[in-house]
Image: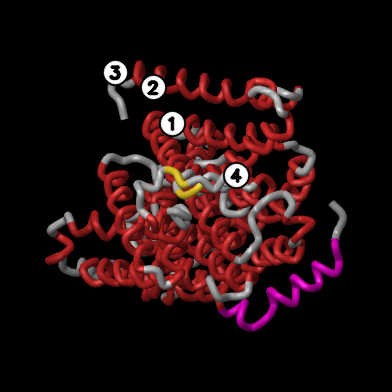
Amino acid sequence: MSLDTDALVLAISMVFQIETLLWMAAGIAVGVGVGAMPGLQSSTAVALMLPLTFNMPVATALGLLIGLYKGSVYGGSISAISFATPGAPESAATVADGNALMRRGKGKKALHMALYSSVTADFLSDVLTILMAPALALIALKFGPSERSWVLILAITLIGALSGRKLAKGMFSAVLGLYIGTMGSDPIGLVPRNNFDLWWLRDGIPLPPLVIGVFAMSMVFQELLRPEVVGAGKEKLADVATLLKSKSEGLKLHEFLRCWKEIGIGLGVGSFVGLLPGLGATVGAFLSYAVAKQASPNKGIGDGALEGVAAAEAGNNATVGPTLVPLIAFGIPGSATAALIGGALVMQGATPSPRMFTLFPEIIYSLFIILLVGNVANLFIGRFFAGIYARLGEVPRRYLIPLIGLMAVMGTYAYQQNPYHVIIMLVMGLIGLGFRLFRIPEAPLVIAFMIAPLAEKNLRKAHLISGEDWITTLFNSPLSIGLAAACALSLYVSIRFQIASRVRAGGGTE
């Protein structure tokens, strides 16, 4: 696609407004704090802040949400290194080496390495995102309704295939998401369906109540089931702020450059993982860490090596930009957080699809610029305020949980001032609680929920255009047949992997 200079100039003016820059910085600042607090995740933070974007300009909304995303993925490393308690699941791979370095008096080096490797991999993966997305969107524009339907179906099968040992749980989550996505009215005939004869479900379930319930309210319900939430006291934690201000040696340039190989592995693996729907930063971190450990067996990764910190943090942060590629190129969210960002775009009147590059080029360019500029803010905030964020681990959860619950209710009601949306959010919170208790992944539900109306619309459109039976409609071109074969292959591979995992585990199941 050719560069639209007018749209680029407009995007630059939109992003570099004081309001947008301040909200982006605020998003990163809050995101790092969320990441540093054990138990919170980027998807929870973005879901809670989503209502704030309803009346914002689109660039400002993107700045806030992408800032939250970037900040929270990095922020988990602070508590992982300082207290051996990962603030977010994607930072769990950092614990072994990061906390070992902290115990040996090299915590300052570990914290600096986590920051610099995170920002480096994030920036380079953002560049890859900017290069890949337009090319993939150009290909997607040539797809007809049948081909687009198969791409969406392939995304759903990949969600299950990439759930590892949780294949059945991943597929259950995706199927439930598809069902919820069909609630409301038939998109062609406008006939009510799946609404349990409730008039306030005739328009379906909006995205904000669903995601706030599944990610935020479910955590509140789960914490209420734990008696320690009420009486938990404050733990004595290391004074990281004093450590960072001390004259102890920080990370040297040659030490950072020595880890170029591990950062490169994290960049490559993380970027690839980010492109695949349903995986996310946690898989990127652990896979990068495992590959780096195999590639550098003599560097002591796992026993307190800077290389281990670099690989894990590069791997999880490198997923941030690429996870948006399938969203803007195909309309398929790459992760739960990407789905929330896509939902914000929908509410701004810009439905994610390859046509965004021609219909809303200024929004695409704004997103690209925010991805790059956000790294600068992340570097600054992480470099000078890591000690303050480490203290957030001392906040008792008995204060935090009621605040999250209040924000969930207020944010849901603020969407359209509809009290029934609060009921939907609470029901989704109970569903999310069940997911947490039975360890069912939430991401497939949200991704499938967003895919459902797109898949149905394309299937119906393909059928109307062809005027033939469904077999002819679905297999009307070599590309359609190839995509159908890819769907079958992904299911076959996932089932074989599931069987092999059970055999290795001696018949145990997840």
Q: Earlier in the sequence, mark 4 or mark 1?
A: 1
**Given contact means CB atoms under 8 Å apart, are the residues at marks 4 and 2 in contact?**
no
**In the depicted structure, whether residue 469 falls above or below residue 294:** above
Label 4 and label 2: CA atoms lie apart by 43 Å
Type of secondary structure dominating the magenta stretch: helix
Any part of residue 80 in sight: no
- Circle on res. 316: none
Q: Amino acid at mark 1?
A: Gly
The magenta stretch spans which residues?
Answer: 4-22
Label 3 and label 2: CA atoms lie apart by 8 Å
Q: Position of residue 304 (x, y in %)?
A: 41, 49
- Circle on res. 501: 2
For disc 3, the marked residue is 507
Quarter of the view holding residue 55: bottom right
**Given contact means CB atoms under 8 Å apart, are the residues at marks 1 and 2 in contact?**
yes
For disc 4, the marked residue is 188
